[in-house]
Amino acid sequence: MNQQALSIVLFLLFVAATLGVTYWASKHTRTAADFYAGGRSFSGVQNGLAIGGDYMSAASFLGIAGMIALYGYDGFLYSIGFLVAWLVALLLVAELMRNSGKFTMADVLAFRMSPRPVRTAAGVSTITVSIFYLLAQMVGAGALVGLLLGIEGEAAKAGTIVVVGLLMIVYVVFGGMKGTTWVQIIKAVLLMGGAGLITLLVLGKYGFNLSGLMGTAAEQSGQADAFLQPGLRYGTEEQGLAGKLDLISLGLALVLGTAGLPHILIRFYTVPNAKEARKSVNWGIGLIGVFYLFTLVLGFGAAALVGSDAIREQNAAGNTAAPQLAQAVGEMILGEIGGTVLLAVISAVAFATILAVVAGLTLASSSSFAHDLYAHVFKRGQVTERQEMVVARIAAFVIGIVSIGLGILAQGLNVAFLVALAFAVAASGNLPAILYSLFWKRFNTTGAVSAIYGGLISAVVLVIFSPVGSGKPTSLFPDANFAWFPLENPGIVSIPLGFLCGYLGTILSKEYNAQKFAEIEVRSLTGAGAEKAISH
Amino acid sequence: MTTRHQERTIYEQVQASPRFQELRKKFRSWTFPMTIAFLAWYLLYVLLSGFARDFMAAKVLGNINVAMIFGLLQFVSTFLIAWAYSRHAAAKLDPLAEELRNEVEGKNS
């Protein structure tokens, strides 16, 4: 059996297992709390694994390993922001959100505000951030799967996007949060297992001597010691000061964005109480931290054992570095069959990774549409649970179909920036609104709406008018030039602006509700009146 | 003044209580400075990566340079802070929170 066939078999096994789980979950999804929050009955460890499965995207696994393989140290630098960010979630957000919210981010933001404008803003922001992230994953999936399966052409890419999209629709529509969580748990185990195995093989090959591995990687890269130092990818010396500010801007968005990502925030509602939420974030931090240490070894391993020319030949961005490495170490240690098997395993893990992440994003955006926009804004809360769930499922279907369509249309475009943009919007709009809601007594409706729209709009507008939008061969519109903002990452401007908008909006409006603040403050810190887990 | 007192919700009463003030202080006095500290520590790392490249390039042990050590220390500090917070929360915050939660839920039902 050749590698492609084996990859497809393994992938079909994963699909069969996850569809089985989805079928089980559909039988156990009766109430809105089941659909949106998995009945709040996942343990801290389970949710910790699901957090890992939700967060470690193909962009993390293949993208960071590839970036390290091609640019060395800067890929590692990139990964660190994604990890440190979890401390913001752990210390300031996870437990308090679990205690005071119900199904969506907006539950906390709208708690003491005028509900319709705040839910509208939070819903718009949630759907925007999730769609950006989703689109990046879908386009990536199309390009990647073609490469791994050796199928060429636009039709194969489009076909992959359709398959990925349909599967994620099935997971979310039928399985809801329970199905999605189990898909993420299975994926996290497979990803950690697969990445861990290759890491061990690479380290074993270098006698567990990191310095030796780094030395060979630097030598093979042709960059010598520069490969082991910051500056080949971000803030290169040719880019001057703007490049370095861009690096800081990116770092800020990464470290502050995670705790404002809607698909991450809704994970905190799936556990019975704040203590389990804390435990799940601790498990998430452990998994994600170890995973980025794996990618460090994978990236240097690919540079050393595959070589940058061979990687660039397959994919200019280095996205195939990890699978190529799997094949190379497999061959070195276990012969040709070993290479074939490991490549097939890692390819199948990459599919699983993509599916678990897109399912989480679809769930977050459809939950917000149904619970925030439909139930509270359009219907002013006059809906039954059943109606809300029907709308959530229809929304998941529509969002899935739309993202399949957009994914196919965006095939030729360079959409890799969308992940960083999703983090920037989350850090600029959502995070200020969340932190002010939880900690600032005076905060009010105008403040919340100003923070969300101020952060969202400024981040998006700055990116459109940056070199990402136009003026460079790699831009979205390479033939036009309307760029006036010099940085590719808007965070350094849009994050302070989001906080400032929230502050100004608040003090310029007299409204505030001391009684409701007392309620959210006491509830968030003590867990009094928190939503309970349900058991069937 | 008495009518105002009677109008106060259970949440306002608990919020004004010394026990809750203690909980809030124990929560904020740990998490707020620590958040500033780890953000500053991360920002320092990013700034050094951008502006102090000669320093970051200095080799310490074999091919392992200051940049690599700094990066790995970010992992270490993240794990340590998560562990320390969980200890702090379990020892200082959880018992108080539970006591106050029972008080609110007891009076509410």
Image: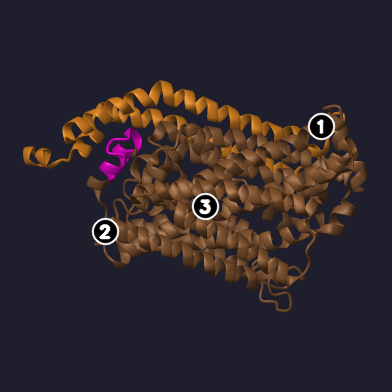
Chain colours: A brown, B orange
Q: Secondary structure at mark 3?
A: helix
Q: Chain of mark 1?
A: A
Tag 1: amino acid = Leu
Q: Position of residue A511 (x, y in %)?
A: 26, 57
Where residue A348 sits: x, y (%)?
70, 49
Judging by the rendered image, the residue that carries numbered circle 3 is A360
Judging by the rendered image, the residue that carries numbered circle 2 is A384
Q: Considering depth in this image, is A238 or A206 the residue closer to the camera? A: A206
Start-end of magenta stretch: A517-533
Q: Is residue A305 magenta?
A: no
Marks 3 and 1 sit apart, C-alpha to C-alpha, by 33 Å
- Residue A304 seen by the camera: no
Could you tell which of marks 1 and 2 lies nearer the N-terminus?
A: 1
Residue A123, percent across and down?
41, 61
Asked whether residue A524 is drawn in magenta, I would say: yes
- Looking at the image, which residue is at 39% across and 46% down? A28
For label 1, the residue is A203
User: Are dots 3 and 1 in contact, CB under 8 Å?
Assistant: no
